[in-house]
Image: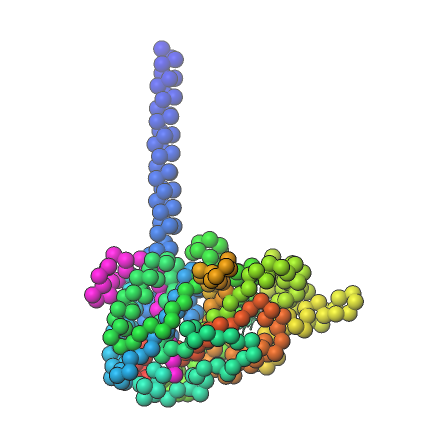
Amino acid sequence: GAASVLGAQAIGGALAGGANAAASAAAEAAAAAARETAVGEAIVPYHGARQAGIETPPQAYARYIALDLAPEVDAAAIRRMLRVLSDDAARITQGRAPLADTEPELALMPARLTVTFGFGQGLVERAGGTAPTWLRPLPAFGIDRLRPEWNGGDLLLHLGADDPVTVAHAARMLLKDARSFASVRWSQQGFRRAAGAEASGSTMRNLFGQLDGTVNPAPGTADFDELVWHAGDPAWLAGGTSMVLRRIAMDLDGWDRVDRPGREAAVGRKLGSGAPLTGEREHDEPDFEALTPVGFPVIGDFSHLRRSRSEVPGERIFRRGYNYDESPADGGISDAGLLFASYQADVDRQFVPIQRRLDELDLLNEWTTPIGSAVFAIPPGCAEGGYVGETLV
Ligand code: HEM
């Protein structure tokens, strides 16, 4: 009777509802899968007037590898090496296995992989090129406690990707092909938050918990172009830049003993929002004239913010650093810090005066110690069929 009709309708309705639910669950799963694999599949173009890996929004993982050329390597050999390495990079960054890849499956996940090449003074001279005057070790600073194992190098390979397996495989491919020309001098790894963990464009937090990178020239703007990209004297560097890499140890145990007001005074910014001590939001302009009720500057004269900011126009840099956290030595519980990477058109005119001022006075120096230092010229990019370094050798 009526009851069984009603019953049948109810069952039919439930079935239809179930099918809908199943369909939308499948759609949701597909969308989730697409979101998940989007990180692995994302590609950053390799070819272009400028090398990738500088203006590229920072990937979660970075590896910086410095190589020393073998004694017998001359200009012709440098050219051969750069051709091979640039070709490897052109393939692997696009998710294609380089020639002779013994683990080609690992090359299929580019995860925004970039490979950026840099040249040390030794390589430029060996290639017979003119080195810009700033391409040499930085002047010695009083705060430096440099360790030989983190300094210098002829050739820099800077790899960045949102996946650590991708980085490891790309590094191995490049090093296998570089092996007959050069040997590894040092290798340093760094990290930021995982891809997708926070909104893109968020300022990174370093291991002191600070927002680090708030005041930075914005890629793609005329301001950035002028500060970072090299105009071309020597000509082979036109469209390139320079990179200073400082390995800066951070004393996390010492930092633990400082209260919150002390920590915020060291930089002149609030830990939570990253706002200046005189403001509310991260990007508020600091007011260096503001005084406390008893007449002291709210943002101290000794603060990192005050000391790192220059009044000389053009004396600015682009910071693109990474955290590091390695195995602690004897009895300690941490060996952590910052791989401080700075890009600028001219190291002597932009980076050195800032570092000199911080060397003279910066409260943050209480807890930070530079233990490695290297300077590289970053040549321009190349078009398809060309190779990075072709303007030099
Ligand atoms: C700003 C941390 C080393 C240059 C800042 C800020 C923090 C910070 C928290 C404020 C937020 C921001 O604008 O990013 C650190 C730490 C360091 C370090 C933890 C070492 C481990 C250096 C070095 C230099 C430098 C070596 C350059 C030689 C700057 C500059 C600013 C800045 C130019 C922006 C200043 C402005 O507001 O105009 N840093 N920093 N920092 N830092 Fe550092």
Q: Is residue 79 above or below residue 179?
A: below
Instruction: Examine the rendering and report whether any part of residue 285 can be seen.
Output: no
Q: Give the mark count.
A: 0
In the drawing, does residue 239 fall left or right of residue 145? left
Q: Where does residue 369 sit, x and y in percent of width and height?
A: 53, 71
In percent of the image, x 32 and y 84: which residue is there?
392
On the image, the x and y values in percent for residue 190 come to 43, 63
Q: Residue lying furthest top in this view?
A: 1
Q: Where is residue 350 in the image (x, y as percent from the top left)?
A: 52, 80
Q: Residue at x 21, y 66 (%)?
A: 99
* Quadrant hosting residue 364: bottom right
The N terminus sits in image quarter: top left
- The residue lying furthest to the left in this view is 100
Q: Nearer the viewer, residue 329 or 338?
A: 329
Q: Give the range drawn in magenta.
A: 96-121
Asked if residue 60 is among those painted magenta in the image, a careful observer would answer no
Q: In which quarter of the image is the C terminus?
A: bottom left
User: Which residue is farthest front?
Assistant: 330
Judging depth in this view, the residue of 78 and 311 nearest the camera is 78
Quarter containing ligand 1?
bottom right
Query: Looking at the image, can residue 188 be seen?
Result: yes
Describe the colour scheme in one phrase. Answer: rainbow
Q: Image quadrant of residue 363?
A: bottom right
Q: In this view, does 334 lie above or below 54?
A: above
Residue at 79% x, 67% y: name it: 294
State the image coordinates of residue 127 (x, y, percent, origin top left).
31, 85
